[in-house]
Image: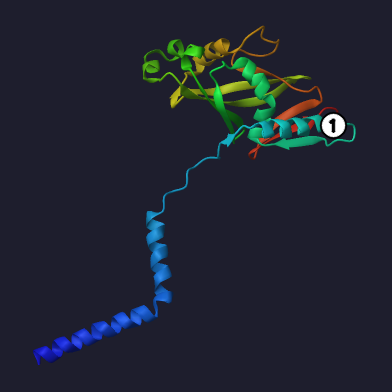
Amino acid sequence: MGCLRRLGCLVLLLGIAVLAWVTRDRWLPLVRHRVGARTETPAPSGPPWELVTARDDSTGKAAILRLGQKTGPVFANLSAAEFTGYVVTELSRQLPPSAQGTTATIIGDELHIRTMVRPSDFGADQALGPLAEVLGEREPMELGGTLDVVRPGLASYTVRTLRFRAIAVPGPAIPTVLDRMQTGVRPPRIERDALPLVMPVQVADVRVRNGRITLYKAGQ
C-alpha cells in the first residue's frame, strides 16, 4: 500500500507539472510581471540634461532672429540646450578656457547649466573654505538661476544656486565667485549675483516654464 500511495503521489505531481506546462502561456507572464515589478530599477527623477551642440546654437539663433522679422512670429519656444547654445558665446566670455562639455536643463522656472571646470579658476578655495580640499583639479560646476530682460539688448541670468560637484557655494559667497568669472565692466542694472547676456533688441521678455524657454517679441 505504501508503494501504491507513493506511486499515486508521483502520478499526481507529474499530472500537475504537465498541466502547468500546458497552461504556461496564461500564468508565466503574470509571474514575470510581478518579479519584474519588484526588481525593476527606479527611473531617475528630474528632467534630463541636454548636451549643448553647435546644432542647438544654430537652431536657437534662427528662432530668435525670426522674431525680428515684420512677418515673423510673436514668440519663440526654445529648449534649454537651444537657448544655452545661442548664448554660449556670451557665457564663454565669462567662463574660463577650462570649461568643457556644457549641458543644460530646466528645473521649475530656472535654467540650469552644467560644465566641467577647474574650481581654482573661480577662487572656489576661498568661497568654500575647508570644503574645497575635497575637490579635484577638474569638477562639474552647476549654475541654476532665472532669466530676465533688463533692457532692449541685455538680459540677466540671476544665479540662485552654484555647485562644484555636490558641494553648494553658500548664497552670500555666490557674488564673489561670479566676480571671478566675469571680465570687463559690469553693465548697469546687472547685480553682482547675475551674469549679463547680450540679447537681440527684438526680444522684450523671456519666461521659463513647462520645460521650455519662451522669448517674446518686442512691441507685442
How many discs appear? Answer: 1
Instruction: Tell me where residue 218 appears, x and y as whole percent.
Output: 83, 27
Horizontal side of 141 relative to 110 (left or right) equals left
Location of the C terminus by quadrant is top right
> Which amino acid does the dot numbered 1 rest on?
Gln
Residue 200 versus residue 46 in the image, above or below: above
Residue at image location 66% in from the left, 29% down from the top: 85
Horizontal side of 216 relative to 116 (left or right) equals right
Instruction: Tell me where residue 8 appears, x and y as whole percent.
Output: 19, 89
User: Is residue 127 at least partly visible in the picture?
Assistant: yes
The residue closer to the viewer here, 54 or 201, is: 54
User: Is residue 107 at least partly visible in the picture?
Assistant: no
Query: Which of the 4 image quarters holds residue 32?
Result: bottom left
Instruction: Tell me where residue 158 appears, x and y as whole percent.
Output: 62, 21
For disc 1, the marked residue is: 220
Location of the N terminus by quadrant is bottom left
